[in-house]
Image: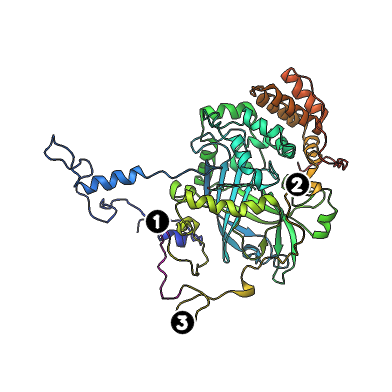
């Protein structure tokens, strides 16, 4: 039928319903009416006014007027591709998650990489975190592993997320700066938020200017749970490692590319896939028990902490391959809706207070970004697994549910779905206790031990790059008190680092901040894995 050959990937079946090839077809309106003249509007005489009656013109212009949707509130700029995940082993003893059910099993995926702060039209190579979001179209519904290219985050509690993002985004009065993090508001927030220390080290390191999406690691960040069919569970951290190696740009290259080719990463990903050089990552799991977690010198619910690989080794369990570019950027890359709440039987959340907030935030924002409650019916978001429930109506509903019954319990004959029971998603039953409080466990307050671990694990060249990045960013901060506070924060991490940055700014290092906890700092040995 003239359609390109797109392989037998399972996600192609639902998407095939909506793929259109317009080649050599008669032009029609949205109602399917053939259009005689697509060049001239209908006028009262050749030099006369254009007529209201011209429904063809009005449909064309009206559609155009509404072509834009709001960009994502964060991660607005991104690029995506189709592919598959292949499990290296049968992991059913550990998790009943469908992608790991058999050695060699393939699950279709759609993966979107992104920057965080920049607007939709901003440059790819700015200093920023990169999103690494994977939608697995599993037999048991969609599982989204919505991760980043850094294993920790800026804050520990969802309550601070709007503040963090307001500090990172262009300043509200003048809309500047559009992409780079170098501005007073971000460093103001950062220097007043000691929990940011570990993430700041990643953010000023080479990891924040990746060479390519193909050469970035990805991390689930939070501690999750893997649950088997008997309900037994373990904690888990997810790591993606590129088989091509992890590479970064140096700052001068990044700065130049930002001007010379703002699409640098987007183009690289597209061209690699187009030429058959399919990017590949391996999935590594860090699996540990609740008893082990209780012995760690940090809290596994704290998203500003890693589990060092020296404490829990990575177990490589599968491979991600991206082998097909999208057909249409808007329909797929722009309309895809990843959501931290999308888990499947075999994967469960933990009480990480950042993760708990993310469970709410994504679907909420997508209701306005994608217009109403039915965006799961947009083809790229539709699971390969079938959807049967009593949800009805709402703007742009596509599904035509038959029968008179859309409630439970019911006694009338009708096509009502039944509960899946133990085959369905069952939350890990966790005893919950304590008074309602706002606050944090004391271990969350050790903000510097792992920031120092990152610093001492870097090579001298990498350390020089970090010093250079702090100097570059802080020289652009106008307010001296913000610079001083940032140096005080660095003094808590490493006096050599603080001294080198202060030298570049022509400043003295202020005394370190008072620690947020009386517990002594934990002395991690340097980690080759960083
Ligand atoms: C996108 C909220 C933390 C990774 C988004 C979006 C929102 C959001 C509202 C836009 C979604 C859309 O319009 O489709 C939050 C909140 C967070 C948080 C409230 C903290 C409480 C994180 C963390 C990570 C992360 C810790 C990484 C582990 C991503 C990614 C995207 C995204 C990768 C882009 C997904 C895509 O490609 O479409 N986030 N986020 N976020 N977030 Fe978060």
Question: Would residue 366 be visible to someone looking at this image?
Answer: yes
Q: Which of 357 and 451 is in front in this view?
A: 357
Label 1 near label 2: C-beta < 8 Å?
A: no
**Residue 79: x, y in percent?**
52, 44
**Circle nearer the N terminus (2, 3):** 2
Looking at the rendering, in which quadrant would you find the C terminus?
A: top right
Looking at the rendering, in which quadrant would you find the N terminus?
A: bottom left
Q: How far apart are marks 2 and 1 (CA)?
A: 43 Å
Residue positioned 13% across, 40% down in the render: 44
Decide if ligand 1 comes within 8 Å of the CB at mark 3.
no
**Residue 24: x, y in percent?**
28, 51
Which dot, 2 or 3, sits closer to the camera?
Answer: 3
Q: Name the residue under label 2.
A: 306
Q: Mark 1 points at which residue?
A: 19
Q: Name the residue under label 3.
A: 412
Q: In the structure shown, which secondary structural element does the residue marked by tag 1 occupy?
A: loop
């Amino acid at each position: 039928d003239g359609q390109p050959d797109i392989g037998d990937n399972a996600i192609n079946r639902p998407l095939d319903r909506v793929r259109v090839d317009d080649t050599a077809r008669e032009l029609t309106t949205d109602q399917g009416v053939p259009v005689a003249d697509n060049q001239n509007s209908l006028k009262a005489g050749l030099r006369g006014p254009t007529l209201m009656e011209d429904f063809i013109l009005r449909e064309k212009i009206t559609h155009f007027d509404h072509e834009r949707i709001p960009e994502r509130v964060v991660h607005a700029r991104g690029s995506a591709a189709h592919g598959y995940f292949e499990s290296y082993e049968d992991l059913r003893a550990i998790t009943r998650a469908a992608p790991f059910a058999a050695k060699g099993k393939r699950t279709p995926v759609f993966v979107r990489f992104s920057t965080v702060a920049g607007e939709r039209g901003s440059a790819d190579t700015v200093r920023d975190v990169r999103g690494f979001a994977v939608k697995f179209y599993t037999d048991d519904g969609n599982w989204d592993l919505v991760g980043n290219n850094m294993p920790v985050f800026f804050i520990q509690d969802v309550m601070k997320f709007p503040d963090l993002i307001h500090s990172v985004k262009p300043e509200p009065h003048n809309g500047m700066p559009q992409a780079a993090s170098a501005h007073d508001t971000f460093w103001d927030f950062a220097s007043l938020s000691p929990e940011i220390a570990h993430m700041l080290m990643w953010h000023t390191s080479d990891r924040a200017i990746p060479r390519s999406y193909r050469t970035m690691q990805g991390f689930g960040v939070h501690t999750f749970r893997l649950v088997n069919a008997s309900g037994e569970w373990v904690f888990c951290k997810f790591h993606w490692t590129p088989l091509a190696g992890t590479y970064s740009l140096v700052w001068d290259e990044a700065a130049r590319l930002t001007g010379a080719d703002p699409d640098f990463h987007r183009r690289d990903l597209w061209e690699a896939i187009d030429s058959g050089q399919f990017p590949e990552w391996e999935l590594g799991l860090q699996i540990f028990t609740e008893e082990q977690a209780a012995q760690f010198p940090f809290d596994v619910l704290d998203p500003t902490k890693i589990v060092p690989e020296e404490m829990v080794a990575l177990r490589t369990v599968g491979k991600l391959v991206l082998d097909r570019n999208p057909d249409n950027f808007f329909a797929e890359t722009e309309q895809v809706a990843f959501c931290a709440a999308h888990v499947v039987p075999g994967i469960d959340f933990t009480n990480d207070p950042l993760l708990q907030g993310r469970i709410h935030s994504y679907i909420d924002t997508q209701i306005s970004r994608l217009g109403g409650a039915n965006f799961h019916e947009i083809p790229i978001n539709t699971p390969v697994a079938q959807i049967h429930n009593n949800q009805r109506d709402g703007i742009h509903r596509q599904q035509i549910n038959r029968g008179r019954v859309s409630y439970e319990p019911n006694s009338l004959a009708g096509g009502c779905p039944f509960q899946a029971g133990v085959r369905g998603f069952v939350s890990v039953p966790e005893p919950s206790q304590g008074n309602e409080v706002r606050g944090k466990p004391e271990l969350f307050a050790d903000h510097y031990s792992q920031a120092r671990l990152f610093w001492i694990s870097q090579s001298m060249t990498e350390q020089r790059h970090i010093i250079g990045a702090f100097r570059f960013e802080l020289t652009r901060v106008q307010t001296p008190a913000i610079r001083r506070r940032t140096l005080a924060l660095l003094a808590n991490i490493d006096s050599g680092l603080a001294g080198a940055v202060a030298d570049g700014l022509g400043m003295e290092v202020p005394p370190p901040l008072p620690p947020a906890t009386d517990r002594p700092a934990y002395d991690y040995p340097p980690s080759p894995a960083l």
